[in-house]
């Protein structure tokens, strides 16, 4: 290869790196701005939900935190509004002793018509209000607005997922899977959609995710 061709190749690689750094910088800046706005709205939502929980006789914390795997396999605490009974983890162990629940959990890491979900929980899940405390995680840099769904430790291995792809970016509050079928897809298809985002990430697909997320929230498509 001639020096001229080598120089052109190096210049092309440097240009791609510059675009990548610019994209990452703008995306982080956007995440901080959105998370600050989200946290402001989080305050009145928290007050309203707390009162709603208390009116149903539930005086436990309305927040729930769970270990999730982030970029480069680092584990962090992800925050959500609690949509299940306070002792959900203990109840899950009991449910998994039943074959029908165990089979469904092993296949999807979730249960359709989960008996642990409260009436208020069903509403905040349908409207995605339960996800809003994740703005705290976004501000801290654990997650991004757009990215693959944050998984629990061991979940990716259980479904033969590819760590090198899935964990090469920050997980997101919403993402390509979330706006393209969400709970209506099987796990294999879900991973394919997440890989697609990672391999094609950029401003265009991010803006498309935001637009489609708004549409999903209002139509409740694929939500369970």
Image: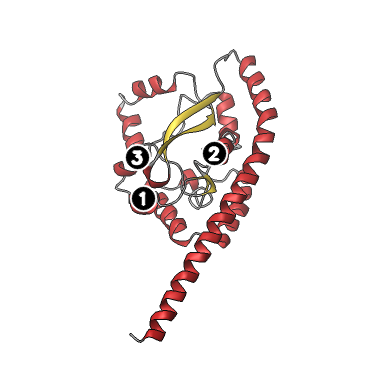
Between 113 and 140, the one lying in front of the other is 140
The local crowd at label 1, few if under 14, some if 14 to 19, many if 20 or more residues have their Cα within 10 Å, is few
126 displayed left or right of 153:
right
Mark 3 or 1, nearer chain start: 3
Q: Quadrant of the N terminus?
A: bottom left
Secondary structure under tag 1 reads helix
Mark 2 or 1, nearer chain start: 2
Please give the name of the residue rendered at 57% of the width and 22% of the height, measured from the top-left corner: 62
Label disc, if present, on residue 133 of the rendered structure: none
Q: Mark 3 or 2, which is nearer the eye?
A: 2
Residue 110 figure quarter: top left
Q: Are marks 3 and 1 in contact (CB under 8 Å)?
A: no
Name the residue carrying label 2. Answer: 140
The local crowd at label 3, few if under 14, some if 14 to 19, many if 20 or more residues have their Cα within 10 Å, is some
Real-space Cα distance between discs 3 and 2? 24 Å
Total marks shown come to 3
Real-space Cα distance between discs 3 and 1? 12 Å
Mark 3 or 2, nearer chain start: 2
Name the residue carrying label 1. Answer: 188
**Measured along the vertical axis of the image, is residue 76 above or below residue 57?**
below
Label disc, if present, on residue 155 of the rendered structure: 3
């Amino acid at each position: 290869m001639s020096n001229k061709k080598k120089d052109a190749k190096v210049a092309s690689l440097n240009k791609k790196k510059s675009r990548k750094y610019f994209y990452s910088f703008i995306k982080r800046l956007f995440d901080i701005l959105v998370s600050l706005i989200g946290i402001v709205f989080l305050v009145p939502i928290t007050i309203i939900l707390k009162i709603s929980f208390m009116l149903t006789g539930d005086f436990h914390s309305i927040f729930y935190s769970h270990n999730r795997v982030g970029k480069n396999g680092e584990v962090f605490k992800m925050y959500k509004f609690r949509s299940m009974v306070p002792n959900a983890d203990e109840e899950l162990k009991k449910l998994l002793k039943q074959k029908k629940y165990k089979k469904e959990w092993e296949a999807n890491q979730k249960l359709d018509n989960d008996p642990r979900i409260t009436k208020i929980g069903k509403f905040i899940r349908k409207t995605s209000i339960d996800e809003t405390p994740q703005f705290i995680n976004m501000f801290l840099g654990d997650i991004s607005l757009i990215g693959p769904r944050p998984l629990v430790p061991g979940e990716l291995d259980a479904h033969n997922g590819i760590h090198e792809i899935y964990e090469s970016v920050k997980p997101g509050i919403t993402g390509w899977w979330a706006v393209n079928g969400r709970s209506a897809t099987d796990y294999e298809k879900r991973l394919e959609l997440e890989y697609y985002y990672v391999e094609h990430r950029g401003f265009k697909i991010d803006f498309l995710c935001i637009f489609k997320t708004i549409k999903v929230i209002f139509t409740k498509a694929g939500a369970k």
